[in-house]
Amino acid sequence: MTQSIRPLAEGFAIPSDAEWRALANSALKGAPFDALVRKTPDGIARGPLFTRADLEDVCDPGAPGAAPFIRGAASARDPFLPWGVRQRADLADPAEANAALLDDLAGGASEITLAIDPTGRRGVNVRSSDELARALDGVMADLAPVCLAPVYESHEAGALFLNWLDAQGYDRASVRGGLGLTVPDESGAQAALAALARYPAIKPVTIRAHGIYEAGGSDVQELAFMCAAGAAWMRALVDRGATADAASGALSVTLAADADVHLTIAKLRAARRLWTRIMEAFGVSAQARALKLHAVTGARMLSARDPYTNLIRNACAGLAASAGGADSVEVRPFTYAMGPSNRFARRLARNLQILLMEESHVGRTADPAGGGYLHETLAARLAQAAWTRFQEIEADGGAAALIASNRLAGDVQAMAEQRAARYARGAESLIGVNAYPELDARKVETPPLPDATDAAAPDAAAPWPALEPLRFAAPFEALRAAAEARPDRPTAFLATLGAPSAFSARSSFAVNRLAAAGVAAIPAETHDSVAACADAFSASGCKLAVICGTDEAYETDAAALAAALKAAGAREVWLAGKPAEIAGVDHFIHMRSDALKDGARAHEVLGIGS
């Protein structure tokens, strides 16, 4: 029997936004209200509160499966497979890649991304029809769509794939998948149209907007590039004789899913909103404007140190992608940042999606985020900002001109530097990297990196756009690697003032800040006096001491303790707290100090890398 919970709320007046604002101002005790406003890297406000009133500025999202398709392309999700579970095959040897992808399909994957790299460095070494046949041996591409992802821009892989499909004897109208074409030039458009003539349900074009994300770009930059590339492809295909509907049906988009669940959901909804607007401008019929959207969990958020923490980030990103309405989702193996994946890592990546389907029941609802005040409002704000940027790109000559001028790379790099600085300051956290790093984390064995073949990269080597991917954990990992190259673990001494209740908060902070650079802290202990603390430091053999205590203790005892530690052999004395005029203290570490600079200084003091 179903019981309503409404009686629990009866008798209470519905508070107004003004009443909430008054309570918030009271709690702030004179601090500005803007202190509660969080903003995205693009400067878009994301709170502190979203209410029904915010929806007044948002257009009607419609119903699932109906224009403008903000709520997805289907009116209801498949109860058994609400989205495509896609797995990437990227082992260099075609036979090994084939064994892995058959295992993936047997274990729950329903689609395959075949990364192709003729050099064997970042994908399957496919240079001939025989090698492609070995990689896809036993794959029923009419049941499990195969989507090519050439590492280098080339039409040859697509031609080989179409010939392989021909040899299988499939019903051509039922074959889905993709060729991974990305550059909207004349040859690309011709290849796309030729593919559609042979296999009308295939998606020959993939707009890999997630490359903007992986290079450190923002959500607005990713969405704006998606729009610009989509418009460029529509023009290229229509100019060569395709109808607007046929051109629209040739395109698919890949966006990145981040551990920021709500922002990712809003981004995917914004993408559908923007895509419908663009297709409308090109004259695409209402029912053909739906976006074919693939989401892949981001690589830039992953860590090669303590990689099990990546499972948390992948779980959040996978939830965001599925709840955000992606048609297919690829969860990267948790060992992705370490090199080739093993069978265990791929199985966890698949199982995460199966858990979202079978245990969390995310797919039971056609649009889980539909009507949410936060998601609808934030999606509209993202879409508006991205549309403004897209119009600027169009006015300057479109996507091709933007890339050729190198402005895109410059804009993305500037955003990446801004984001990297936030990780260094601790304004953004990566668990296990700049927050709560574990120096003795459990090791994970991965296959060795493959030997590259003698094949050179194709002439058209650069992907479109040619942006260098990054990982925000990499600078911290470099510090960790330098520290771990020493025969013994570098250590620092925590010089405490007062009882544990007085110093534990700052000693814990110091432990984490040092560990982010691979430096271990000797466990904090209480000391009866400044002299006793200095004696303990001398006995430790350390060269770096960090004073930890309260602000009051710093005022009375920090200078004397710093002098005693220097007399006991300290090369430098640091203090955990905000900078102040304290004699003998060489450096201050605190919540907004630069963790990378702190780590580099600790290495210098301890003689690491010298």
Image (spheres, grey):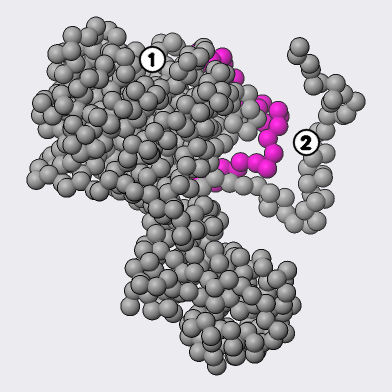
Query: Earlier along the polypeptide chain: callout 1 or callout 2?
Result: 2
Q: Amino acid at mark 2?
A: Asp
Disc 2 is placed on an element classified as helix
Left/right placement of residue 497 relative to residue 24 reads left
Task: Identify the residue at horizontal 47%, vertical 61% (top origin).
Answer: 439
The relative height of residue 269 versus residue 310 in the rendered view (above or below) is above
The secondary structure that most of the magenta stretch takes on is: loop
The relative height of residue 515 versus residue 45 in the rendered view (above or below) is below
Please name whichever residue, 439 or 292, is drawn nearer the observer in this view of the structure. 439
Label 1 vs label 2: CA separation?
A: 41 Å
Report the label total.
2
The magenta span reads: 42-68
Please name whichever residue, 320 or 356, is drawn nearer the observer in this view of the structure. 356
Residue denoted by label 1? 283
Disc 1 is placed on an element classified as loop
Task: Identify the residue at horizontal 51%, vertical 42% (top origin).
Answer: 312
Left/right placement of residue 425 relative to residue 394 reads right
Q: Residues within 10 Å of mark 2 (few under 14, many from 20)?
A: some
Residue denoted by label 2? 17
The relative height of residue 545 versus residue 207 in the rendered view (above or below) is below
Task: Identify the residue at horizontal 52%, vertical 33% (top origin).
Answer: 320
Q: Looking at the rendered structure, which numbered label has been put on residue 448?
A: none
Query: Is residue 189 on the magenta stretch?
Result: no
